[in-house]
Image: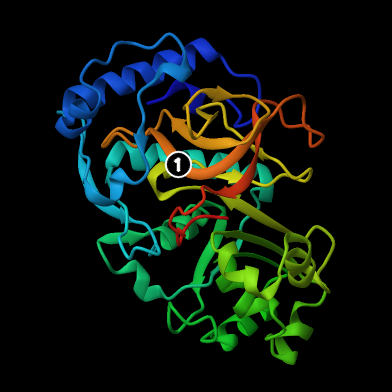
């Protein structure tokens, strides 16, 4: 179990030497237990800095199923990314210990943004999505909020149709509760809730209620509608009680358990058990305060080597202290590498 996760608040000063030691040991375990990973990095030696650590390009998870075998690892299920423009999903092998660590990580990060009071969790998905042994990225994101919920309600009759909201279920919840936690993929949330589709009875029932919205993924699908963050947030919170807010988080199925919510000042923060680098797309040199390709790493992945991933997303490390008061590294998400696949679960 990672001491960095269990001994620290998510955002604050980090012991960089402890992080490097943990992720070096994790990398060595994956080299020893995963043949395909060892073939990618056959000459691995303990790194002197995070920039030297071996990584895998995110695209490899579409063509190979990485799995680390050891006596301590108990593999349980597979997590699938949402569909990409290629039609090929990433498949991430999960294990019992990693799942526990990832759940604790998501909870610590999201609680910092939405609080820890128990209220009903409303999910824009169908309950049938829970049946499959292979879990979708959308369901995994929703279930990361379950520890903050008093109870759980899936309100779509059809998981793929944002127009299939069971308004009677939502109406009943609003009759009984003054506060809700709502999760949906960005484009689903807009089409089901924010795009002037709420029935008048639901709009009246929402007036004065406190609602915390959490969403991820799918901004590409809203570009043609000219929907930006400000419009999205204002439409969702219109008429709600003070304290209602919208939390947008970025994350990858290949980095499950680590989410990067957008703070009040407009930046994304890195928890102490993770790190983010930016690399020049041409030279792979590490960059500071300049745009480049995001590399994401964390100390939570035991069952497969998805602990250090070079993404196809663009970003920039932002130096200095953040106005929101959270300490540690922060970054700006800028979009996708040109001609990269549109990822169904990417928040860009």
Q: How is the image coloured?
A: rainbow
- Residue 259, image x and y in percent? 54, 44
Corner quadrant of residue 3: top left
- Residue 276, image x and y in percent? 54, 31
Query: Which quadrant holds the N terminus?
Result: top left
Question: Is residue 92 among what the camera can see?
Answer: no
Seen at 63% across and 36% down, the residue is: 291
Looking at this view, is 215 or 174 the one in front?
A: 215
Looking at this view, is 297 or 71 the one in front?
A: 297
Q: Is residue 199 above or below residue 84?
A: below
Q: Is residue 57 above or below residue 4?
A: below
Q: Is residue 38 above or below residue 269?
A: above
- Residue 104, image x and y in percent? 47, 39
Q: Identify the secondary structure beneath mark 1.
A: strand
Q: Residues within 10 Å of mark 1 (few under 14, many from 20)?
A: some
- Residue 248, image x and y in percent? 64, 54
Question: Is residue 163 among what the camera can see?
Answer: yes
Looking at this view, is 301 or 317 the one in front?
A: 317
Q: Name the outermost residue toward the front.
A: 282
The reply, left or right, for residue 28 in relation to residue 246 is left
Seen at 50% across and 23% down, the residue is: 285
Q: Is residue 314 above or below residue 278?
A: below
Corner quadrant of residue 15: top right
The reply, left or right, for residue 127 in relation to residue 171 is left
Q: Name the outermost residue toward the bottom.
A: 200
Query: Which quadrant holds the C terminus?
Result: bottom right
Q: For mark 1, what is the residue?
A: 311
Seen at 42% across and 17% down, the residue is: 52
């Amino acid at each position: 179990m990672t001491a960095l996760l269990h001994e620290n608040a998510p955002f604050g000063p980090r012991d960089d030497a402890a992080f490097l030691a943990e992720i070096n040991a994790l990398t060595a375990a994956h080299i020893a237990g995963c043949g395909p990973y060892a073939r990618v990095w056959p000459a691995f030696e303990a790194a002197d800095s995070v920039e030297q650590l071996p990584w895998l390009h995110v695209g490899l998870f579409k063509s190979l199923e990485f799995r680390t075998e050891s006596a301590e690892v108990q593999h349980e299920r597979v997590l699938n990314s949402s569909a990409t423009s290629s039609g090929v999903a990433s498949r991430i092998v999960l294990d019992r210990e990693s799942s526990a660590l990832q759940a604790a990580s998501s909870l610590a990060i999201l609680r910092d943004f939405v609080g820890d009071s128990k209220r009903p969790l409303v999910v824009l998905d169908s309950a049938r999505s829970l049946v499959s042994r292979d879990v979708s990225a959308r369901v995994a994101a929703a279930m990361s909020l379950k520890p903050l919920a008093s109870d759980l309600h899936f309100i779509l009759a059809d998981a793929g149709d944002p127009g299939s909201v069971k308004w009677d279920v939502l109406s009943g919840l609003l009759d009984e509760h003054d506060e809700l936690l709502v999760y949906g993929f960005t484009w689903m949330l807009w089409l089901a809730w924010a795009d002037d589709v709420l029935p008048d009875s639901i709009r009246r029932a929402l007036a004065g209620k406190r609602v915390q919205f959490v969403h991820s993924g799918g901004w590409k699908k809203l570009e043609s509608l000219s929907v930006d963050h400000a419009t999205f947030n204002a439409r969702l919170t219109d008429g709600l009680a003070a304290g209602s807010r919208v939390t947008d988080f970025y994350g990858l199925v290949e980095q499950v358990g680590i989410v990067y919510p957008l703070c009040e000042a407009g930046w994304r923060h890195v928890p102490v058990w993770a790190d983010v680098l930016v690399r020049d797309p041409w030279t792979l040199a590490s960059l500071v305060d300049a745009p480049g390709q995001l590399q994401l790493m964390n100390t939570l992945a035991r069952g497969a080597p998805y602990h250090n991933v070079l993404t196809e997303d663009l970003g920039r490390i932002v130096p200095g202290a953040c106005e929101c008061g959270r300490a540690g590294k922060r970054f700006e998400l800028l979009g996708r590498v040109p001609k990269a696949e549109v990822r169904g679960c990417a928040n860009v």
